[in-house]
Image (tube, rainbow, N blue to C red):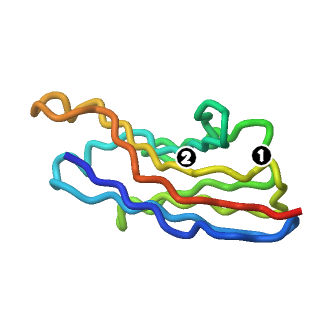
C-alpha cells in the first residue's frame, strides 16, 4: 500500500506564498505504480475540490481558479509531489489533501486511491 504525508501548510497573509509537499511511502512496487498525484482542497462547508494534478510523465492540470498562481511539480526519485502557491487569497483557505492514484495497485490486492491526512492553509486578509 501507499502512505502519503503532507507538510508545509500554515498561516500567511493575502498576497503571500506557501509551498506544500507530499511524500509517498510504501512498497516499492506500489510506489513505482503511482500514476497521477494531485492536490485537492476542502474549505469549511464546501465539497472537496481538485486543485492540480500531475501525471507520472509530468503532464499537469491546474484548475482555472488557481491557474497562474499555483504550480504543481513532482520528483519521482523522491516520491514527492509539491504545490507552490503564490499570490494567495483568503478564498484559498482550506485543508489541502494529497492524493495518489495507483491503478496497478489493484493487481496485488491493494487500493488504487490514496489520501494524505491533510494540511491546513489559512490566508488572512
Q: Quadrant of residue 35?
A: top left
Q: Quadrant of residue 17?
A: bottom right
Apparent side of residue 108 relative to residue 123 in the rendered image (left or right):
left
Q: Circle 1 sits on which residue? A: 66
Look at the numbered discs 2 and 1 and tell me whether their residues touch, using CB distance below 8 Å.
no
Q: Position of residue 3 (x, y in %)?
A: 28, 53
Pointer 1: residues within 10 angstroms few (<14), some, or many (20+)? Answer: some
Number of marks drawn: 2
| Frontmost residue, 61 versus 39 | 39
Quadrant the C terminus occupies? bottom right
Pointer 2: residues within 10 angstroms few (<14), some, or many (20+)? Answer: many
Apparent side of residue 104 relative to residue 5 in the rendered image (left or right):
left
Q: Secondary structure at mark 1?
A: helix
Apparent side of residue 114 relative to residue 122 in the rendered image (left or right):
left
Q: Circle 2 sits on which residue? A: 39
Q: Residue at x 37, y 37 (%)?
A: 101
Instruction: Give the Cα separation between the discs numbered 2 and 1.
Output: 12 Å
Residue 11: which disc?
Answer: none
Q: Residue at x 29, y 30 (%)?
A: 103
Q: Secondary structure at mark 2?
A: strand
Which sits earlier in the primary sequence, circle 2 or circle 1? 2
Would you place residue 74 above or below residue 49 in this image? Answer: below
Q: Position of residue 16 (x, y in %)?
A: 81, 70
Q: Position of residue 86 (x, y in %)?
A: 78, 63
Q: Residue at x 33, y 34 (%)?
A: 113
| Frontmost residue, 118 versus 86 | 118
Q: Quadrant of residue 90?
A: bottom right
Q: Residue furthest left?
A: 108
Q: Residue at x 57, y 64 (%)?
A: 20
Amino acid at each position: 500500500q501507499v502512505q502519503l504525508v503532507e507538510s508545509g501548510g500554515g498561516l500567511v497573509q493575502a498576497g503571500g506564498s506557501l509551498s506544500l509537499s507530499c511524500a509517498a511511502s510504501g512498497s516499492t512496487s506500489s510506489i513505482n505504480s503511482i500514476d497521477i498525484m494531485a492536490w485537492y482542497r476542502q474549505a469549511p462547508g464546501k465539497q472537496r475540490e481538485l486543485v492540480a494534478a500531475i501525471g507520472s510523465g509530468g503532464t499537469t492540470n491546474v484548475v482555472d481558479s488557481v491557474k497562474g498562481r499555483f504550480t504543481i511539480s513532482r520528483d519521482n526519485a523522491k516520491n514527492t509531489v509539491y504545490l507552490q502557491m503564490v499570490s494567495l487569497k483568503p478564498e484559498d483557505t482550506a485543508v489541502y489533501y494529497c492524493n495518489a492514484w495507483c491503478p496497478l495497485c489493484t493487481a496485488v490486492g491493494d487500493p488504487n486511491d490514496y489520501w494524505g491526512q491533510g494540511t491546513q492553509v489559512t490566508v488572512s486578509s
